[in-house]
Image (spheres, helix red, strand yellow):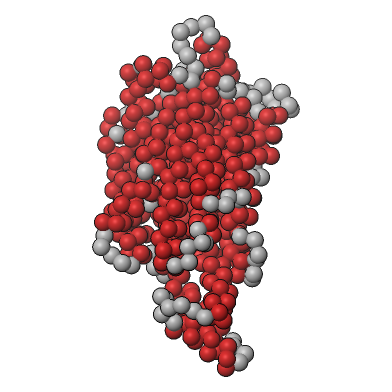
Amino acid sequence: MHGFPDSNTPATASAPVSGPWYKSLNRYHWFVLAVSALGWLFDCLDQQLFILSRPAAMRDLLSYIKDTKLLDEASTFYGDIATSVFIAGWATGGLIFGMLGDRIGRAKTMMITILIYSVCTGLSAFSQTVYDFAFYRFLTGLGVGGEFAVGVALVAEVMPAVARPQALATLQALSAIGNVTAALINMGLGIAEGQGLVQSPWRIMFCIGALPAVLALFIRSRLREPDSWVQAQASGTLSTKKLGSYGELFADPTLRKHALLGLVLACSGVIGLWAIGFYAPDLIRKVQEKPVTAKIIATEIAEAKSPEETALLVSIRDADPKAQLDEAQTARKKIISSKVKGRVAIYQGLTSIATNIGAFFGMFGFGLLSKRIGRKPCFTIALVAACLSTAMVFWFMQDLWQIFILAPIMGFCQLSLFAGYAMYFPELFPTRLRSTGTSFCYNVGRFVAAGGPLVKIWVNSLFDEPDPILRLRYGGVAMCGVFLIGLLALPFLPETKVKPLPE
């Protein structure tokens, strides 16, 4: 079909192949892996565009608040609310489209989800208030949440058994490219803003995020359903077993146990990433804003062309933060602020890139190590490492050089968990419920994670600390214990190393 060999067979039926895992793949296997990886890559691109543009978007949409301190507080508050709404949309979409993936097919559902998150990302660029922005993020989350479960189910069912773990780890690892691309876009637009870009960079970023819709058309023309799903669908019409049924999932004691314990395991990584890890770029922005402002003003004073200009810049430098500036000071400070935003956006981007370089190797590493020592020991190591490395970043990260040391370590440890989820969850459920069960584990945890940013607000409020940077540090470290919750589920879950996919 479409020039590919007839190789769409269940992973459990593949003959063993000696040598590296990728030697067992033919052209169609590579095509499925590439399409699924691109779908998830663009999915993660959208997530990261949101994370990096969130502070600027909130400040822009709330610009009617003139008091600087109130604007900062409102931007943080509504940014957390938008994050929670986005994650709730992700969880809702995951449940709906995970079920549809089992009922109408992996390929069809993937196409629908990519269209949804692409179009709604584009709509986010036209937001006028924090409320319609949050609404568009909810709709985007519907598509983002649905794509993961059907993508990993598709890869798990099409790949030969010998290649399945590493193929799924590769699928997850390549998501780091989407995150790095988002960081590069953010940095490029930050430089443009410093040079006087008229249009808001965050709006341009969301317009770029609409481009993956083209991939959905390609999926529609070339991708076919796995034979294992086609067979399960045929047998499902002749028996009492239903495809994509949550009732069926919870009626079976073993599957119910796997779903609930898998949910606990997923909650650790998902909450840890969205309520803590993804705030690392915000931390570096807050930490660097003051010294960057001082450097830019010092440079402009040194390059001033007249005593009057020097006096104006010195008055801005020495002004009380609460003092009312005159017209000339306000105009010049606006120019300085644009340069500061551009410079800080570069530092945010560097933090994201450094984190995702570490993530790339961490996700590949999880695949390699789990093949040797098993899924459960790997999860134990990754959960403890994620807790310690994240606490280290939020407590110590201050100077620019630390971005290139601490952020990659955190990314390696945190994101390795998500390679584990991509590999492990499809191995817990039969074909007729694979997308449904995977989506339940991965996405119901997001309903809990949606409260993570709100819990962060509450935790931050517990610290009687006027410095917002220290509040962010204390809150981040205090919440790192969430990574250890997953350890409670591991003793009661099965080890799936070298076992075939359940049919």
Nearer-the-camera pick, 86 or 60: 60
The residue at the far top in this view is: 238
Residue 432 position, x and y percent, is 49, 18
Q: Estimate the x, y position of residue 288 in percent, counting from the top left.
A: 45, 69
Q: In x, y percent, where is residue 331?
A: 57, 77
Instruction: State the image coordinates of residue 427 (x, y, percent, origin top left).
Output: 43, 27
Question: Which residue is more in the foreground, 97 or 403?
Answer: 97
Q: Nearer the viewer, residue 375 or 478?
A: 478
Query: Is 13 situated above or below 56?
Result: above
* Quarter of the view holding residue 255: top left
**The N terminus: image quadrant:** top right
Q: In the image, what residue occupies the spot 29% across and 41% down? A: 485
Q: Is residue 108 left or right of residue 265?
A: right
Does the rendering let one see residue 269? no
The relative height of residue 491 versus residue 404 in the rendered view (above or below) is above
Picture residue at 60% right of the left edge, 59% below the top: 201
